Image (cartoon, helix red, strand yellow):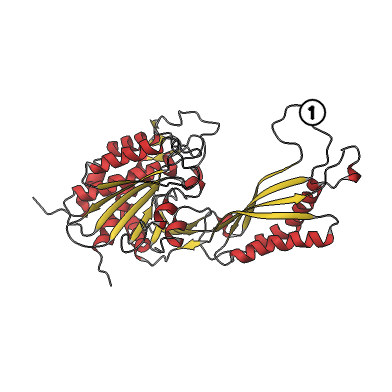
Amino acid sequence: MSAPTLQTVMDLIDGRTDELVALTQDLIRFPTINPPGEAYRPCAEYIGERLKKRGFTVEYVRGEGSPGDSDSYPRTNVIARWTGSEPGPCVHFNSHIDVVEVGAGWTVDPFGGEVKDGRVYGRGACDMKGGLAASIIAVEALIDSGLPLPGALEISGTVDEESGGYGGVAYLAERGWFSEPRVNHVIIPEPLNVDRVCIGHRGVWWAEIETKGRIAHGSMPFLGDSAIRHMGAVMEEFESKLYPAMAARHSDMPVVPEGARQSTMNINSIHGGQAEGFDGLPAPCVADSSRMVIDRRFLIEETLEDVKGEVKAILDGLAAQRHGFRYEMRDLFQVAPSMADRDGPVASTTAAAIETVLGKKAQFVCSPGTYDQKHIDRIGKLKDCIAYGPGVLDLAHQPDEWVGIDDMTNSAKVMARAAYDLLTRKRS
């Protein structure tokens, strides 16, 4: 028999298309909805039991004390490690197992894993159980090929990425699971399209702004002070000053889509006065409080301090100019932008594998939103981390979410090639 080669691995992956589809279906059928964090443990155990049979050492780590963790909804992560024949680096494939709520508009069972027209449908198919399945098939094919593999291969299924990753990758990174020398290279199979290497993401700052007023009878509003009108003044300042200023800023980061190469801000919610959900007639009161939640996405060329200061300057300006204007601003969540070196080992090796498998040059991109690279970079201090996987980014969180079978197969080939090259490359 001839010695195994990388083509042996590619042939094994081609021969396991049905297995790849079945694995994706099985993963979709775990309704791992976050919040509240359903079916995390059974999904993690399914992954762990499969990999344990392939010679992996498997550990389950609960994110105890993290947001949402409870005995009813334990934040259960699985980390599986396979060790090669001689010392070498560790290549880690990290996927989140949680999915967002189903929402309306589905024409198929969201947790049925239906297959039609070369696609697997279901919540999480694209984001990102198809990527998880492809990474498992890629690593198993590498091991089964008989190629000599130094170092170690790891697969993890982690939780809560959709709500910040604090019970998942952040919790693990704080405890050394994503730091050198234990791990050297990380690929996160997020759905950024099969011909793209995602090297980072924009920053994010969520905050709540509350304007203050004074309650009074609605028939005599002049005796009170409407917090809602004060919030309207905030909105007017945002529209006339902040939004035009953000639109004028553009990044050298290769963020996709093109509209996200500028600074952006979404107003997630705004509320004041009578509580929502009450079916009766409203009470005749002047609102003494109004609250707004903002979602500010910023560029690597901006600092978080400047981003916050820009909003605070508008609010302070209103306080100085507008009679009775009072406010409070509370931070909810913040993450700095992250960007790996496109010439670094994991990015360049994955790009080369894409060119070999797909026959075209890879596109380097950055994500408009954050993903778990932020924790691997910020907490784990591990810079050699990218996102690469099957799935069309625009389908994430949509009804009738799907992942293409050919894309999963091709991405598994890319991941296998990249992992092999990372394990066997000469290290300086």
Whether residue 131 sits left or right of residue 337 in the image: it is left
Residue farthest left in this picture:
1
Q: Position of residue 229 (x, y in %)?
A: 81, 48
Whether residue 395 sits left or right of residue 406 in the image: it is right
Whether residue 406 sits left or right of residue 310 in the image: it is left
* Circle count: 1
Residue in view at x 39 percent, y 34 percent: 30
User: Between 115 and 243, which is closer to the camera in this rendering?
Assistant: 243
When asked about the image quadrant of residue 318, the answer is: bottom right
Residue 222 vs 260, above or below: the answer is above
Q: Quadrant of the C terminus?
A: bottom left
Q: Position of residue 389 (x, y in %)?
A: 39, 49
Residue 139 vs 425, above or below: the answer is above
User: Between 299 and 404, which is closer to the camera in this rendering?
Assistant: 299
User: Between 10 and 324, which is closer to the camera in this rendering?
Assistant: 324
Q: Position of residue 238 (x, y in %)?
A: 73, 56
Does residue 387 show up?
no
Residue farthest bottom in this picture:
428
Q: What secondary structure is marked by label 1? A: loop
Q: Position of residue 344 (x, y in %)?
A: 37, 66
Residue 227 vs 362, above or below: the answer is above
Residue in view at x 42 percent, y 43 percent: 75
Q: On the image, numbered disc 1 is attached to which residue?
A: 281
Q: Callout 1, which amino acid?
A: Leu
Q: Residues within 10 Å of mark 1 (few under 14, many from 20)?
A: few
Residue farthest top in this picture:
280
